[in-house]
């Protein structure tokens, strides 16, 4: 009994010691200060390529006010926040702090007010001239450049053109089936919209959901896991008027669509 008790005590002590060392290592995370005044600590390195300007990043985050450690916001329990790096879609310090992160990585960002919400603050939660603290986890990086492919371009009777970038598997989608999609839309070489920003697939029931004609035709025949590039003439999209200011008149639309899942009719 004494031997067993002693061994258990040693294991407990070793466990406590290991936890203390782990915490000590975390506490030793180097604080990096950039030229802009942003400070950050790498809490976890992550794997793969580093996120760079022009890519869509999906992150989970928690936000505190630096002066009193009051928790202001968190994405916990929600879809990750998606934004394009370097486009000014988030505050400057957040944009800069996420650049260079790798998927699975975590950082603590210490953002001075000038790189946050500045002299005006934000609503009632963030007073003027507030320094901010974020803990950020990078969940996903999505390249927003068209996929390189030598796939044959098929032109249908309606004028729709498409390329099979990836075949997929299973039964082909048909009228009445619901296809859960991820997509990227380009107009004149510029990214206009993407479902990846919202962190969840966009469902379309072929022949029913109110989307442009080119989508219904373009999804027909796709298989689960497949990817297509659709080149949609304005007649099958938003017509002669377009949808200003986002989509110009007579605009040709280019989509890359992934069939994440297909529910059969």
Image (cartoon, helix red, strand yellow):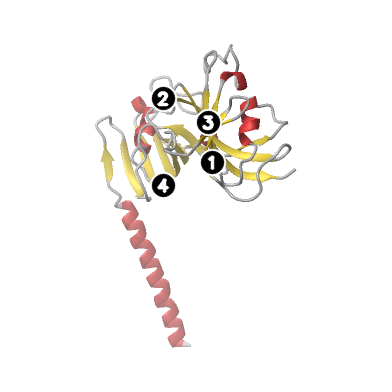
How far across and down, in percent of the image, does residue 1 sit?
Answer: 48, 88
Q: Nearer the viewer, mark 2 or mark 3?
A: 3
Q: Quadrant of the C terminus?
A: top right
Residue at mark 1 to residue at mark 4: CA–CA distance: 23 Å
Q: Earlier in the sequence, mark 1 or mark 4?
A: 4
Residue, far left: 35
Mark 3 lies on residue: 255
Q: Is residue 73 left or right of residue 119?
A: right
How far separated are the C-alphas under marks 3 and 1? 10 Å
Mark 4 vs mark 3: which is more N-terminal? 4
Q: Residue at x 41, y 75 (%)?
A: 11
Q: Which residue in the protein does label 4 denote?
A: 103
Residue 160, quarter of picture: top right
Kindly indicate whether the residue at mark 2 contacts the one at mark 1 (C-beta within 8 angstroms). Answer: no
Element type at mark 2: loop
Q: Residue 91 in the image: x percent, y percent?
A: 41, 28
The reply, left or right, for residue 240 in relation to residue 56 is right
In the displayed structure, would residue 174 be above or below residue 35? below
Which is in the foreground here, disc 4 or disc 3? Answer: 3
Q: Earlier in the sequence, mark 2 or mark 3?
A: 2
Identify the image quadrant of residue 84: top left
Residue under label 1, please give it.
227
Query: What residue lies at 52% left-to-right and 21% top-to-bottom?
Result: 252
- Give the side of residue 83 with respect to residue 29, left or right: right
Crowd around label 3: few <14 · some 14–19 · many ≥20 (10 Å): many
């Amino acid at each position: 009994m004494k031997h067993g008790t002693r061994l258990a005590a040693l294991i407990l002590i070793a466990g406590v010691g290991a936890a203390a060392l782990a915490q000590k290592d975390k506490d030793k995370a180097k604080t990096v200060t950039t030229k802009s005044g942003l400070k950050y600590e790498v809490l976890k390195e992550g794997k793969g390529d580093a996120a760079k300007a022009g890519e869509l990043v999906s992150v989970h985050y928690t936000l505190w006010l630096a002066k009193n450690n009051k928790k202001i916001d968190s994405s916990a329990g929600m879809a990750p926040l998606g934004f394009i790096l370097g486009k000014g879609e988030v505050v400057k310090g957040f944009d800069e702090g996420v650049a260079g992160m790798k998927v699975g990585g975590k950082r603590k960002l210490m953002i001075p007010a000038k790189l946050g919400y500045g002299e005006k603050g934000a609503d009632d939660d963030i007073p003027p001239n507030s320094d901010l603290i974020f803990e950020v986890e990078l969940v996903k990086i999505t390249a927003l450049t068209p996929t390189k492919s030598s796939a044959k371009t098929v032109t249908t009777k309606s004028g729709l053109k498409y390329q099979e970038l990836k075949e997929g598997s299973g039964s082909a989608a048909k009228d009445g089936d619901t296809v859960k999609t991820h997509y990227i839309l380009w107009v004149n070489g510029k990214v206009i919209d993407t479902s990846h920003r919202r962190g969840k697939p966009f469902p379309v029931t072929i022949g029913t959901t109110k989307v442009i004609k080119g989508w219904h035709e373009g999804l027909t025949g796709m298989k689960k896991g497949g990817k297509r590039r659709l080149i949609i003439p304005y007649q099958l999209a938003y017509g002669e008027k377009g949808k200003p200011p986002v989509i110009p008149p007579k605009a040709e639309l280019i989509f890359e669509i992934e069939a994440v899942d297909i529910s059969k009719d």
